[in-house]
Image (cartoon, coloured by chain):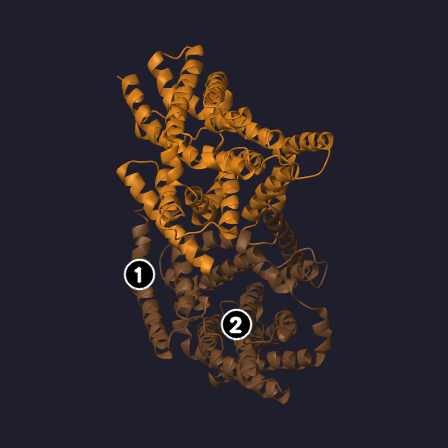
Chain colours: A orange, B brown
Amino acid sequence: MEFIGVLVFILFTTTLAGHFSKRIGIPVVIGQLLVGIIFGTGGLNLIHPDILIHEFSEIGVILLMFLAGIESDLGLLKKYLKPGILVAGLGILLPILASLGSGLALSLNSKEALFIGIILAATSVSISAEVLKELKLIDTKEGATILGAAVIDDILTVFLVSMSISFLSGESTTNQPMSLIILEQIAYFGLIFFLVKFIAPTLIRLSKRLYATSSIIITSLFIALSMAYLADFVGLSSVIGAFFAGVAIGQLKEHQEIFRNVEALGYSTFIPVFFVSIGLELEFSKVAEQWKFILIFSLVAIFSKLFGGYLGAKLDKFPSTSALMIGAAMISRGEMALIILQLGSQVGLIQTNYYSSMVIIVLITTFISPLLLKYFALRTSE
Amino acid sequence: MEFIGVLVFILFTTTLAGHFSKRIGIPVVIGQLLVGIIFGTGGLNLIHPDILIHEFSEIGVILLMFLAGIESDLGLLKKYLKPGILVAGLGILLPILASLGSGLALSLNSKEALFIGIILAATSVSISAEVLKELKLIDTKEGATILGAAVIDDILTVFLVSMSISFLSGESTTNQPMSLIILEQIAYFGLIFFLVKFIAPTLIRLSKRLYATSSIIITSLFIALSMAYLADFVGLSSVIGAFFAGVAIGQLKEHQEIFRNVEALGYSTFIPVFFVSIGLELEFSKVAEQWKFILIFSLVAIFSKLFGGYLGAKLDKFPSTSALMIGAAMISRGEMALIILQLGSQVGLIQTNYYSSMVIIVLITTFISPLLLKYFALRTSE
């Protein structure tokens, strides 16, 4: 029963933290991370990371990526494909190059500098989308470009993470020869194609004929968890499987019902545990020690994404203030970067030494993005 | 990721097992238990009971009891209070007395014989309710009496289990003096009263003002898990907390939305793990060895409940065939008895030696109840 107590405590504190974060106008994810930081080993030491926290958080990540996949609006993506690709592409390229350069200048090893770049290539526009809704700018060309670019950014970073976990990390989970692993991964991408085109629609259709309670939800979760598991099995990352399982479900007419149920399921059990688990192992001593690292990479994170987005938008002939607004909206790394950070630190792609500082950097980008977005949005509408 | 693989496997096999059970007309719970038996340590030894299985199954039990609580129709109960109390009361008293007698005759110790009686005092009318719906008898006086008696049976057995775990089990989880424990438990029952009357309605009302995704569902789960945790904390059983949390939610106008969501959440993750976990540790050698025990207690289980229900109904002036139909509907012990069995074996109230045989006895009652119910129902409507 001890874990049930911990779960109750996490549900209670994250819900309140999320609520008050929103009320005072800071992103919910920051409030929920603070719970982990306050009650974790670096703080009051009340919640200890154990196998149950770890497993719940792992399922939480799968559900977050699954939900992100379902939400990916491929229709919007097709309509704003050109600005989307430009904004996402440059918004990925610049952070990677800038991180690689800064990392080498700070004498990190090149693999680690590259992986920091991949963490900072991620974006999470959920907070930006809220700001845009609030300012009634979500249905503008800028709004659509931001959402479209976010989908492409998700897809590309999910690929980059999977590939880097497969090829950059020294740890090979299997003892298979490289050629076999590559064959398996190609087969896996083939499976994703068939999943989106045939398997998911067929399974969901069949599931309606099942004599079972909530059969559509069970089947969707089965698809998400099994694709995540298979991805991990062939040496890719579980997030790629969960994300494309979501994309497959997103194509179906049942996607809203499934989204609503998986959202309730995830946010009432597994997802809060993930957010808390991120903060649990934060070490303040490291943060104080590495203030230079944090300062430099925070600036890299903010400006590389801002200018990446800006340049992409300018190339598609957006006016300058619109382009800055688009860039500002992409700065927030939110849960996507935290997921990549956690995956990377598990396989040793980033030293646990830098873990705490990276969490702080992600928090800073998440905090600053809506402020800059509001600033440029107000200048755009003038 | 290993556990995710096990979870995927459990979801897949239990969903199919449940589906085909229904198609060939046997209760779903039997099909799902078979999965655990086939793949558990007594069978192919593919799924091993570990801490994750244990914790998921513990949450599964809490959700099952929470759902049972939400479903308790107190309105129906008030309307058919007299026959409900008579049927439930005698349907609890007879199995306990018969088990105690048979247990002592088989030279079990008296505590164990009593606890077997409490296991066999439980009932699960979900299968009977389906049969009655099929035969269009659910809205008859007999149908309402069965459902009302089931609610009373749930409430009484939940109390009996909590009390026996608190007083019969030698294991004291805390080192507090008995007087303090009793005070805490009285305070807990006071808390249940306030929960139903004030706390739950207030929390759910407040939760609507929360800035949070699925805030009503999170709040309901918070109530269920925290009441279960507190019950365990004061030395009662977690099921009593979860059940009355459900009763409290069942009074609110949001109860259908909450039920639907918790059902989807439970049946797509935690509840299948519970059903599988029951079968995992079944030992066939014990079953073969204890055929006499199984035979005697199966007969005790079937006839004590049948005559208990029959007598109760006769006392309220039901005709004989109606009374037999009511008794037959109550025979099925289903998940309620399995939950009590698992709780009891965890605290040593029943020897692990008898665990496998008790599972078989519960399966037999669950299998035979719908057959007898149909037989008497068809004679009633003649």
Mark 1 closeness class: few <14, some 14–19, many ≥20 residues within 10 Å: some
- Where is residue A130? Give x, y as percent: 35, 32
Whether callout 1 and callout 2 share a subunit is answered yes
Which chain hosts label 2? B
Give A236 or B199, whichever is nearer the viewer: A236
Which chain hosts label 1? B
Q: Secondary structure at mark 2?
A: loop
Residue at 55% over, 80% down: B117
The amino acid type found where label 1 is placed reads Ile
Give A310 or B102, whichever is nearer the viewer: A310
Residue that mark 2 sits on:
B347
Q: Secondary structure at mark 1?
A: helix
Residue that mark 1 sits on:
B199
Q: Is residue B260 above or below residue B292?
A: above
Q: Is residue B221 above or below residue A156?
A: below
- Where is residue A274? Give x, y as percent: 46, 44
Image quadrant assignment for residue B70? bottom left
Q: Quadrant of the C terminus of chain A?
A: top left
Q: Is residue A324 left or right of residue A96?
A: left
Can I make out residue A16 in this image?
A: yes
Residue at 49% over, 67% down: B139
Residue at 37% over, 40% down: A284
Q: Is residue B307 above or below residue B127?
A: below
Q: Is residue B343 left or right of residue A197?
A: left
State how far apart marks 1 and 2 are (Cα). 31 Å
